[in-house]
Image: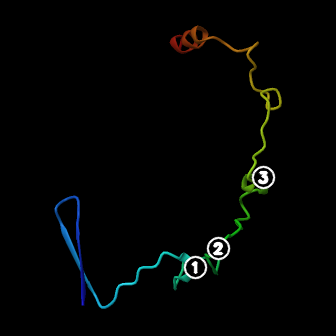
Amino acid sequence: MTEIELEMENDTELIIECEQIYIMDDYEQLKNKPRLNGKEISGDMYETDPTIPEWAKAQNKPSYTPEEVNAVNNDNAITIEEIEAIFNGL
C-alpha cells in the first residue's frame, strides 16, 4: 500500500492510500478521457458549436475602421470637458 500525504494551506492534512500509483505524462494514453458531443477529447479537435460563427473560430479575426462601424473619428470626438459637462448636467 502506498501512502501520499498532502499538506493544505489551512493546515489540513490529506492522506491518500492506494494500491498502485501511475504517473502518466501523455494525455493520449489516458483512459476514460472526457467527451464532447459524444466524441472523446483527444488530439487536435475542431470547434463544432453551431452557435459560434466561423469567423469567430478563425485564427485571424476581422478588423474594421471606425468609419466602417460608424464610430466617432478624432475629428468629431468630444473632449473630456464636454463629457464631464454632460454628466454634471444630469
Which of the 4 quarters of the picture holds residue 21? bottom left
Q: Which residue is mark 2?
A: 43
Q: Amino acid at mark 3?
A: Trp
Q: CA distance from mark 1 to mark 2?
A: 7 Å
How many discs appear?
A: 3
Question: Which label is found at residue 42?
Answer: none
Rate crowding at label 3 as few (under 14), some (14 to 19) or many (20 or more) other CA atoms within 10 Å. Answer: few
Q: Amino acid at mark 1?
A: Glu
Q: CA distance from mark 1 to mark 3?
A: 30 Å
- The residue mark sitting in front, 1 or 3, is 1
Along the viewing direction, whichever of 34 and 78 lies nearer the viewer? 34
Q: Amino acid at mark 2?
A: Gly
Q: Position of residue 78 (x, y in %)?
A: 67, 13
Question: Which label is found at residue 55?
Answer: 3
Q: Residue at x 57, y 8 (%)?
A: 81
Q: CA distance from mark 3 to mark 2?
A: 23 Å
Helix, strand or loop at mark 3? helix
Q: Residue at x 24, y 90 (%)?
A: 1
Q: Are marks 3 and 2 in contact (CB under 8 Å)?
A: no
Along the polypeptide, which appears first: circle 1 or circle 3? 1
Along the viewing direction, whichever of 14 and 66 lies nearer the viewer? 14
Q: Residue at x 75, y 26 (%)?
A: 71
Helix, strand or loop at mark 2? loop
Q: Which residue is mark 1?
A: 28
Q: Are marks 1 and 2 in contact (CB under 8 Å)?
A: yes
